[in-house]
Image (tube, rainbow, N blue to C red):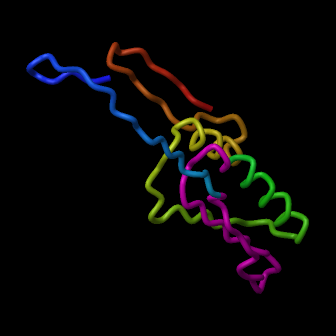
Amino acid sequence: TIRSIDGVTRDVPLKREFAEAKDPVSYRVSETRSDGTKVGYVRITEFNSLVKTSLEAALRDLESQGVDAYVLDIRGNPGGAFQSAVEIAGLFMNDKLATDVVDGNGVDLKFR
């Protein structure tokens, strides 16, 4: 229900549409170097609710193929859910500090 400036009210139906979250991860073995290092290439197009689970599955698959080095490509990634980005960083940082945020009240928040 909305009300105009002159006080007239009326109902306005709104159509709600929800975009389906798409798998933001694609991957492949990109090369085997002369020293035997197998490199996995992982592209993350956005940090959404699916990214952590999808990336974990991709890393398991790449590891089963003998990959021992990774390229994470986040070029053109518009961002997304902050918590998802922190979770992704945590997969590679062995419980080290991923980011440090100071809020508007000066409270220091550390994310691992």
What residue appears at the point 33 percent right and 33 percent down from the top-left corner?
12
- Is residue 3 left or right of 14 when viewed as pictured? left
Look at the picture and state if 103 lies above or below 66.
above
Magenta segment range? 23-51
- Is residue 46 left or right of 31 when viewed as pictured? left
- Is residue 39 left or right of 49 when viewed as pictured? right
Pick the front one: 103 or 92: 103
In the image, residue 50 lies in the stretch drawn in magenta: yes
User: Image quarter for residue 68?
Assistant: bottom right
In the orientation shown, which residue stands out farthest toward the left? 6
Residue 21 rendering spot, x and y as whole percentages? 61, 51
User: Image quarter for residue 8?
Assistant: top left
Residue 28 rendering spot, x and y as whole percentages? 74, 74
Look at the picture and state if 57 lies above or below 4.
below
Residue 52 rendering spot, x and y as whole percentages? 69, 46
Image quarter hosting the C terminus: top right
Image quarter hosting the N terminus: top left
Residue 17 rendering spot, x and y as whole percentages? 50, 46
What residue appears at the point 65 percent right and 40 percent down from the top-left corner?
87
Pick the front one: 37 or 65: 65
What residue appears at the point 53 percent right and 45 percent down from the top-left corner?
18
What residue appears at the point 81 percent right and 69 percent down from the top-left corner?
67
Picture mark count: 0
In the image, residue 19 lies in the stretch drawn in magenta: no
Pick the front one: 38 or 43: 43
Look at the picture and state if 71 lies above or below 10.
below
Look at the picture and state if 38 lies above or below 76.
below
